[in-house]
Amino acid sequence: MEIVLLGATGHVGTYLVPRLVELGHSVTAVSRGHREPYLPHGAWKQVRRISLDREALEAKQSFAKRILSLKPEIVIDLICFNPESARTLVEALKGVVRHYLVCGTIWVHGHSEVVPTTEAQARRPFGEYGIQKEAMERYLLEQAQLHDFPVTVLHPGHIVGCGWAPLNPAGNFNPRFFETLACGEELVLPNLGLETVHHVHADDVAAGFVAALSNWSVSVGESFHLVSPAAVTLRGFAERVSAWFGRKPQLRFMPWDQWKQTVSEQDAAFTWDHIAHSPNCSIEKAKRLLGYSPRYSSLQAVYESVRWLIDHGMLSINTKGDK
Ligand SMILES: NC(=O)c1ccc[n+]([C@@H]2O[C@H](COP(=O)([O-])OP(=O)(O)OC[C@H]3O[C@@H](n4cnc5c(N)ncnc54)[C@H](OP(=O)(O)O)[C@@H]3O)[C@@H](O)[C@H]2O)c1
């Protein structure tokens, strides 16, 4: 199949492109060309690379035409963030592609209610990103239901992989929190540390996209969570990471309003976003219909990524302690 992958060199594309090539697909990788995939892979030699800027072309109303000119049979869209972007492409791709697979986010749910959250639950997104992704999902699924447009929406959790810092036990991306645990120093967590985060390894996200592609008849018109088998609490996450570093966890807890004063504004904003959602999503639907079977637990995914950061000198666990 001729597959055009939009946003091909990021977290998901790094793992998805080699999988698609290995399955014998002909892949056109679209990005602005600002960066290379996180991991090298021989499969990229067989990939047609196209540099274009979606936002710039959308502003000139020529993005969809450009994508159409690549003659896709399947489009995998990892960089659609609102219903307007989706609409432009859907209108151009109607009657042309066999399948349009779009990346959503578990943020479409807003805060968790009954957990694990299923895809069928009512959406109550908050924050611009989640609100726009939910509107995008609603528009796309309506196109499938009312107009037989062959679309599938896949919702990853916090994506983890080799090459970037994973979401840490304080609910933000500052690697210093891993360093604190590695050195056996005290880590202060917000509230009781019982709010949750839900990671997923980027390769499991890639496998989920492939599973949706391979199970067209049941995936079209549907959305699926792509997360690890189980969410973790911040406290449990911190305790396990401490143990992984061979340390006894030294944890202390502080009410949110005090805790947020102890970290940078950016760290506090990311932590708030994660604990206000406290995601805990079900993968039963993806398991049942797609055979989705994630290889990594949340913690295994994080350990692999932290190991990569250590091996590449990106986590300075020697500077603060004796490890
Ligand atoms: N990261 C997460 O934890 C997470 C969680 C849930 C859902 N998601 C969803 O996953 C998808 C990927 O997000 P991400 O943050 O993981 O992406 P990412 O790793 O930052 O990758 C983005 C990709 O898109 C390309 N790109 C960015 N802007 C572009 C533009 N204007 N035109 C063409 N190409 C462009 C980038 O390459 P260039 O810079 O070279 O253009 C790169 O290949 C998004 O839909 C996001 O909502 C992410």
Image: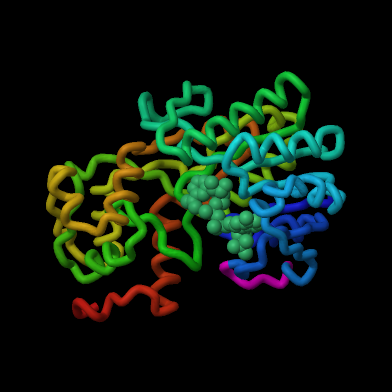
For the residue pair 16 and 69, the one nearer the viewer reads as 69
Q: Is residue 296 left or right of residue 275?
A: right
Q: 208 left or right of 217?
A: left
In the rendering, at what x and y percent does residue 80 appear? 62, 44
The answer, for residue 15, to whether it is visible in the render is no
The quarter of the picture where residue 310 lies is bottom left
Against 104, residue 158 (above or below) is below
Q: Residue furthest front?
A: 60
Q: Is residue 306 left or right of residue 264?
A: right
Q: Residue at x 47, y 21 (%)?
A: 122
Please, is residue 205 above or below residue 117 in the view?
A: below
Position of residue 94 measured from the top left corner of the image (x, y, whole percent) = 81, 33
**From this viewpoint, is residue 231 visible?**
yes
Q: Quadrant of residue 117?
A: top left
Residue 55 is situated, as x and y percent measured from the top left of the image, at 64, 51
The magenta stretch is 38-43
Q: Is residue 56 magenta?
A: no
- Which color scheme does this rendered protein use? rainbow
Determine the residue located farthest toward the top in the rendered image: 146
The residue depicted at 56 percent of the width and 30 percent of the height is 135
Q: Nearer the viewer, residue 110 or 217?
A: 110
Q: Position of residue 226 (x, y in %)?
A: 54, 42
Would you say the magenta stretch is mainly helix, strand or loop? loop
Q: Residue at x 74, y 35 (%)?
A: 90
Q: Quadrant of residue 197?
A: top left
Quarter of the rendering occupied by the C terminus: bottom left
